């Protein structure tokens, strides 16, 4: 059975920090062939969502940024990532659901915003997110802002 956690940066173990950066690099940099600066300084003030297998292997991750740290008046869920061999097991839905619940608990008076890869907009729409504006390129990949209203 998987285990889910929400931790501040200072609560993460050294291994968890290593594993979350390794997972993000494996998917966003290597798999998606996208060279970008993943370590952006926002991790230090974020809440980190971690999904572990029963063997304590990290397979899912996202981070939640407080209002003002990403978009001015919204909480932000970002860096949403699932290890390749867990994507067809509905674990992405579990990760997004858990992330939304934690963001609502942390920032109950705020809307939640994401910068979604355009090809995943229907996936996020199934969780209540609505497209905002036009698509744009972020690190060479088409994205669209999506908002989950209170």
Image (tube, rainbow, N blue to C red):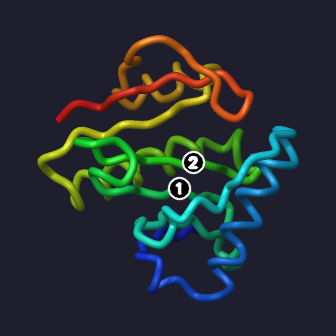
Residue at x 20% of width, y 55% of height: 107
Point out the residue furthest to the top here: 134
Point out the residue furthest to the left here: 109
Residue at x 38% of width, y 56% of height: 65
Occupied quadrant, residue 125: top left
Label 2 vs 1, first from the N-terminus:
1
Query: Considering only vertical position in the picture, is 27 above or below 2?
Result: above
Q: Give coordinates of residue 82: x percent, y percent.
A: 67, 50
Task: Identify the secondary structure beneath mark 2.
Answer: strand
Q: Which mark is residue 96?
A: none
Tags 2 and 1 touching, CB below 8 Å: yes
Cα separation between marks 2 and 1: 4 Å
Closer to us: 12 or 143: 143
Picture quarter with the N terminus: bottom right
Occupied quadrant, residue 98: bottom left
How many numbered marks have been drawn onto this rendered protein structure?
2
Q: Which residue is mark 1?
A: 62
Q: Give coordinates of residue 53: x percent, y percent.
A: 65, 69
For residue 10, side relative to residue 136 (left or right):
left
Q: Residues within 10 Å of mark 1 (few under 14, many from 20)?
A: many
Q: Residues within 10 Å of mark 2 (few under 14, many from 20)?
A: many
Query: Considering only vertical position in the picture, is 111 above or below 99?
Result: above
Occupied quadrant, residue 74: top left
Q: Which residue is mark 2?
A: 80
Task: Identify the secondary structure beneath mark 1.
Answer: strand
Picture quarter with the C terminus: top left
For residue 24, side relative to residue 90 (left or right):
right
Q: Give coordinates of residue 140: x percent, y percent.
A: 74, 28
Residue at x 54% of width, y 15% of height: 135
């Amino acid at each position: 059975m998987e285990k889910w956690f929400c931790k501040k940066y200072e609560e993460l173990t050294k291994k968890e920090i290593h594993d979350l950066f390794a997972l993000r690099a494996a998917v966003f940099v290597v798999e998606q062939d996208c060279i970008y600066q993943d370590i952006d300084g926002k991790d230090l003030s974020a809440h980190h969502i971690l999904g572990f297998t029963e063997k304590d292997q990290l397979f899912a991750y996202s981070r939640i940024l407080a209002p003002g740290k990403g978009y001015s008046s919204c909480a932000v869920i970002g860096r949403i990532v699932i290890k390749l061999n867990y994507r067809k097991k509905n674990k992405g839905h579990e990760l997004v659901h858990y992330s939304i619940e934690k963001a609502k608990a942390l920032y109950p008076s705020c809307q939640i915003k994401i910068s979604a890869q355009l090809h995943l907009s229907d996936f996020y729409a199934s969780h209540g997110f609505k497209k905002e504006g036009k698509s744009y390129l972020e690190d060479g990949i088409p994205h669209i802002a999506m908002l989950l209203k209170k």
